[in-house]
Image: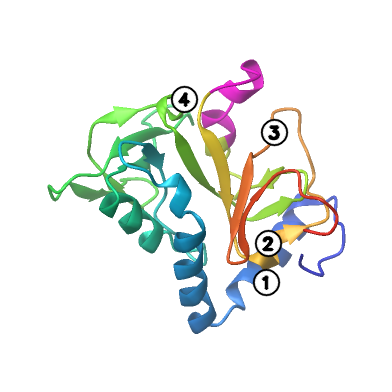
Amino acid sequence: MTDILPITDKPTLRRQLRRARMALPPAYRAAAAQAIARHASRLLKRGKRVGGYLAAGSELDLAALLNAALWRGARVYLPQIPRRGRRLWFTRLAAADRWYLHPRYRILEYAGARLRAERLDVVFVPLLGVDREGYRMGQGGGFYDSTLAFRRRVAAGGPLLVGVAFDCQLVDAVPREAWDVRLDCLLTESGLRRLPLREAEA
């Protein structure tokens, strides 16, 4: 767990977490990306619908994990920002070259067959910070809060929600809102762990 002190102010905590993540050396980041692909291997089964993301900025790179999923025969889906609202679609990655830049956010997306998150088997969720109870802090855009809101209505079922982060992004507590959804697992360079974490794991 990072040594960042408990902070209730979201902008301050976001700044500290971004600095901690950006301070990681390139070699460490590359090794962490390979490690998470190994740790996630049991979730990447043939025929499974796996939702991932393309790393932006200093986020942990999922390329090795997504390539492993494709090699094992899983179906990989990537987020697509909607024209209206904040509820993401997930589009299936295929061999055809259908990449484009989102006109507003200028991030890379893929034009494939679309699903909602509810129909996926596993969703690897990007985050800025996460606590050992499984509550995440994102970049502040609200896209994943809106996308995963179905978990507040359905007590069981739906995809396994796996937060992806470096170990330095694990904190004692993140500020919580009524709409926050708890993650099921945490995937870092140290391993894949069920949430909430026991004290010895944090």
Q: In the rendered structure, which disc, 3 or 1, sits on the residue that comes first in sequence? A: 1
Which secondary structure, mark 4?
helix
Q: Is residue 27 above or below residue 114?
A: below
Classify residue 183 by image quadrant.
top right
Q: Which residue is mark 4?
A: 118
Residue type, mark 2 in image? Gln
Q: CA distance from mark 2 to mark 3?
A: 18 Å
Task: Give the distance between the C-alpha atoms of the residues marked 4 and 3, in whole angstroms.
Answer: 16 Å
Q: Give percent across and percent down for residue 60.
A: 51, 63
Name the residue rendered at 83%, 55% in the picture.
172
Cβ atoms at labels 2 and 3 below 8 Å apart: no
Instruction: Give the quadrant of the C terminus.
Output: bottom right
User: Earlier along the polypeptide chain: callout 4 or callout 1?
Assistant: 1
The magenta region covers: 145-157
Three-letter code for the amino acid on which mark 4 is drawn: Glu
Identify which residue, 42 or 103, lies in the foreground: 42
* Classed neighbour count for the residue bearing mark 1: other residues with Cα under 10 Å, few (<14), some (14–19), many (≥20): some
Please name the residue that numbered disc 2 is placed on.
169
* Mark found first going from the N terminus, 1 or 2: 1
Q: Position of residue 34 (x, y in %)?
A: 44, 69
The label shown at residue 180 is 3
How many numbered discs sit on the rendered protein?
Answer: 4
Left or right: 190 with respect to 147? right
Marks 1 & 2, CB-CB < 8 Å contact: yes
Label 3 crowding class (10 Å Cα cut-off): few <14, some 14-19, many 20+?
some
Which is nearer the N-term, disc 2 or disc 3?
A: 2
Q: Label 1 near label 4: C-beta < 8 Å?
A: no
Residue 192, position as x, y percentages in the image: 60, 54
